[in-house]
Amino acid sequence: MHRLLIISLLLTSATALSFAAESPGLDSLVRLLGDSDDAQLQQDLLTGIAEGLEGRRSVEMPSTWPTALAKLQQSSSSTVRDRAIQLALVFDDPDAIRLLRDRAVSAKASVEDRARAIELLVAKKDAGFDELLILLVADPKTTRSALRGLAEYDHPETVETILRNYSWFDADARQDSLQTLASKRTWAARLLDAIEAKEIEASDLNAYTVRQLHSLGSKELTARVQSLWGEVRATPADKAKLIARYKEQLTAETLANADLSAGRQLFNRTCANCHRLFGEGKQVGPDITGSQRTNLDYVLQNLVDPSGAVSKDYQLHIVVTTGGRVITGLVVSENEQALTIQTVNEQIVVPLDEIEDRALSSLSMMPDGQLQTLSSTEVRDLIAYLGSRAQVTLPKQEE
């Protein structure tokens, strides 16, 4: 009964917090955290408080917080310790910021702990942390976290740091770096300069990054992208002709001779950033395992003209922050304080008071023109793999 009463208080207070962070309920919940020895109850309380304060970067620290934090950091539960530090940042606790900065650079900390420390400090938008992120790009254990974090700041060395290190980045880090460079107009212009100078291969730009560049709303940038990568969107008449041409090429005999392993490799490169198939890939867009994959008309329609019919759940949202960052993705949730948006490579919580402009696009998050970047053999292999009945092995060099 005691536990049920506490949880009831938690839910009631958490709801109140979303409207009034200075509510006496916050101090009461923090006091409960310091008094309890029940790890599960502590976790429930921390979760409720965090949900109530979601979207706020800074809230006045309750007087009972230092005592509660000292106890929570002794917990045997890593979840409790992590969520306590997360909440400490919202309270502008200087000890928590120092702890996380030390953890972010510590060679003794695990890769996961360092990544989490970077993620929390970026979410806090810790002043001056971008100076450290610039250095952490060069550490393979923190490269991806640092690259994603830099998108939240406006450090003058971001572009040159990425370009200087780009050659040794792995495939995932390259996509993170491209998404960061494509988040602001000035950075995007320098990215396109690098592609024109062959510092970065145009083929490294996937369809999602092209869509992000298009979302920046610059006619000049869009024209440059089209010259380097291809059309962002063709006319419906052109699409119909393109679909008809692919149908003529992709006969049953042609598809029967496809290399399914190569097709899977292409899927991993071009589709798995957003879609799952046979249990693999990301869940940004719909899982296509159960879709009409064996229907050639259906597959071509969705690949050639993905914006022809867009579900409301998968319409593209374009958010411009007061810091000049453009975020393109799907809205996961929204409350009175913040908007949570899923991009191709991360989930971002944006406080509503930091949104300068937002728009809902009629376009799908999946851009047009993906098949046009592939050779006829690659198109055959990808389409055949998409329609396959079961998973196949990757080519030996990727296994």
Image: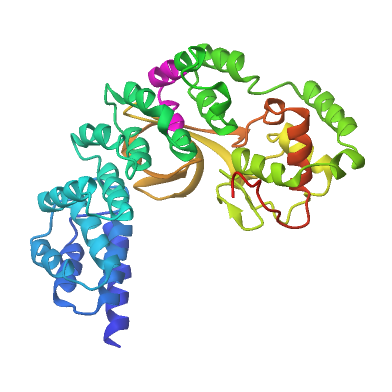
Q: Is residue 185 magenta?
A: yes
**Residue in view at x 48 percent, y 23 percent:** 216
The foreground one among 43 and 248 is: 248
**Residue stretch rendered in magenta on the structure:** 177-191
Q: Where in the figure is residue 201, as x and y percent of width and height?
A: 53, 22
Residue 342 vs 184, above or below: the answer is below
Q: In the rendering, at what x and y percent does residue 307 appear?
A: 68, 34
Q: Quadrant of residue 76?
A: bottom left
Name the side, left or right, on which 99 lies relative to 283.
left
Q: Which residue sits at x=30%, y=76%?
A: 40
Q: Going by the image, does 194 lie left or right of 72?
A: right
In this view of the protein, which residue sits in the foreground, 14 or 89?
A: 89
Q: Is residue 230 above or below residue 100?
A: above
The image position of residue 149, as x and y in percent, is 33, 38
Task: Inspect the magenta stretch and tell me whether residue 190 lies in it.
Answer: yes
Furthest residue in direction front, as rendered: 396
